[in-house]
Image (cartoon, grey):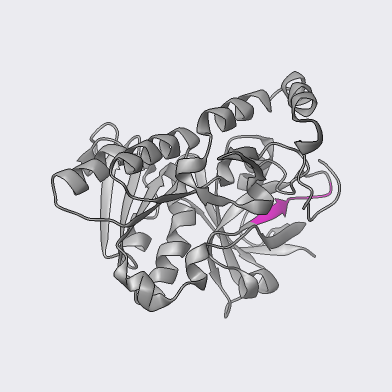
């Protein structure tokens, strides 16, 4: 038994897309949420943002980058294979789904997707499109070969702007430079931004949007490790509050996120010595009191 892989696609050298048969998750999923995959009896928890869902077909789309042993193991599975656990949807959905649609239509949204961040941005833009809200999207990557979700995004966004760091495709520059060009040189006006991608990209996107006075929401899914609030990896400072991305988020006010602290924590969490040091310095705030799932790795 388990959850069957009904489709598998390789999007680039290290990024894969899978459609998983998971009717209950597909029926409940909302933009911005994530799931936890456990491949087999010995598998560790792998939190992955939901890239799409189809309640009628009962499928959920996940997109993942091969970075460690678990994601490598997942990439070796084929269509027809099954994974042991597919838990979700978890995390808080995007706040805009609870807002008045007519109000959303009056606000100019820009979605900023860096690298694999294009996958979790897609269901948000798709939701906007289905509700008659036109939005613009920036998709950025280091080079042309690793751009993902361009065609899918073009079907649901008003405008899609592609940029590459090396200039091999689209605008020559990063997502921050692209945004500044749209506002300063192309006369675009945005009232709200959403940024999803690597931590360093979100940090600089928020510095840019602050200068441009565009309130920004970021998704901190990249710092999650076990996705339960227990491991302490996604403990983050939002203003003067301690939050946990997997339980309280993954979305937060980007201007309030302490990115430097979060990125330093990501590095420390990679070693046992670093994890011990964090447990000691965090004290009682190391784990979330709202943890939904018991047990560690």
Answer with the quarter of the image where residue 67 lies.
top right
Q: Work out whether residue 56 or residue 172 is closer to the camera in this orientation and state it.
A: 172
Residue 250 x/y as whole percent? 59, 51
Q: Is residue 10 above or below residue 262?
A: below
Residue farthest along the right direction in this orientation:
295
Residue 211 x/y as whole percent? 30, 39
- Quadrant for the N terminus, please: bottom right
Residue 80 x/y as whole percent? 66, 62
Q: Is residue 153 above or below residue 141?
A: below
- Residue 105 visible, this orientation: yes
Identify the residue shown where x is 71% and y is 59%: 86
- Quadrant for the C terminus, please: top right
Numbered disc total: 0
Residue span colored magenta: 35-41
Q: Work out whether residue 126 or residue 216 is closer to the camera in this orientation and state it.
A: 216
Q: Work out whether residue 277 or residue 270 is closer to the camera in this orientation and state it.
A: 277
Residue 173 x/y as whole percent? 25, 35
Q: Work out whether residue 286 or residue 293 is closer to the camera in this orientation and state it.
A: 286
142 horizontally vs 294: left or right? left
279 horizontally vs 117: left or right? right
Answer with the quarter of the image where residue 184 lies.
top left
Residue farthest along the bottom direction in this orientation:
56
Identify the residue shown where x is 37% and y is 73%: 103
């Amino acid at each position: 038994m388990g959850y069957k892989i009904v489709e598998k696609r390789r999007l680039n050298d290290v990024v894969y897309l899978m459609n998983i048969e998971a009717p209950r998750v597909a029926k409940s999923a909302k933009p911005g949420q994530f799931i936890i995959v456990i491949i087999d009896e010995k598998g560790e928890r792998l939190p992955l943002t939901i890239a799409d869902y189809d309640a009628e077909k009962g499928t959920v789309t996940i997109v993942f980058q091969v970075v460690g042993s678990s994601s490598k193991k997942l990439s070796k599975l084929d269509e027809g294979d099954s994974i042991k656990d597919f838990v979700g949807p978890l995390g808080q959905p995007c706040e805009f789904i609870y807002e008045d649609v007519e109000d959303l239509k009056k606000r100019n949204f820009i979605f900023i997707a860096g690298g694999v961040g294009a996958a979790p941005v897609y269901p948000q833009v798709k939701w906007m499109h289905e509700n008659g809200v036109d939005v613009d999207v920036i998709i950025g990557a280091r080079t042309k070969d690793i751009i993902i979700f361009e065609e899918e995004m073009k079907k649901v966004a008003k405008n899609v702007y592609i940029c590459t760091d090396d200039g091999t495709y689209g605008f020559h520059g990063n997502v921050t430079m692209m945004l500044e060009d749209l506002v300063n040189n192309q006369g675009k006006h945005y009232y709200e931004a959403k940024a999803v991608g690597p931590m360093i990209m979100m940090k600089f996107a928020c510095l840019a949007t602050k200068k441009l006075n565009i309130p920004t929401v970021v998704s901190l899914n990249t710092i999650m490790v076990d996705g339960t609030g227990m491991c302490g990896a996604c403990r983050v400072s939002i203003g003067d509050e301690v939050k946990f991305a997997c339980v309280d988020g993954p979305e937060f006010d980007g201007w309030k996120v302490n990115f430097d602290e979060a990125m330093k924590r990501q590095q420390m969490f990679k070693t046992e010595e670093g994890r011990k040091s964090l447990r000691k310095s965090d004290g009682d705030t190391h784990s979330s009191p709202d943890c939904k799932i018991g047990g560690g790795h």
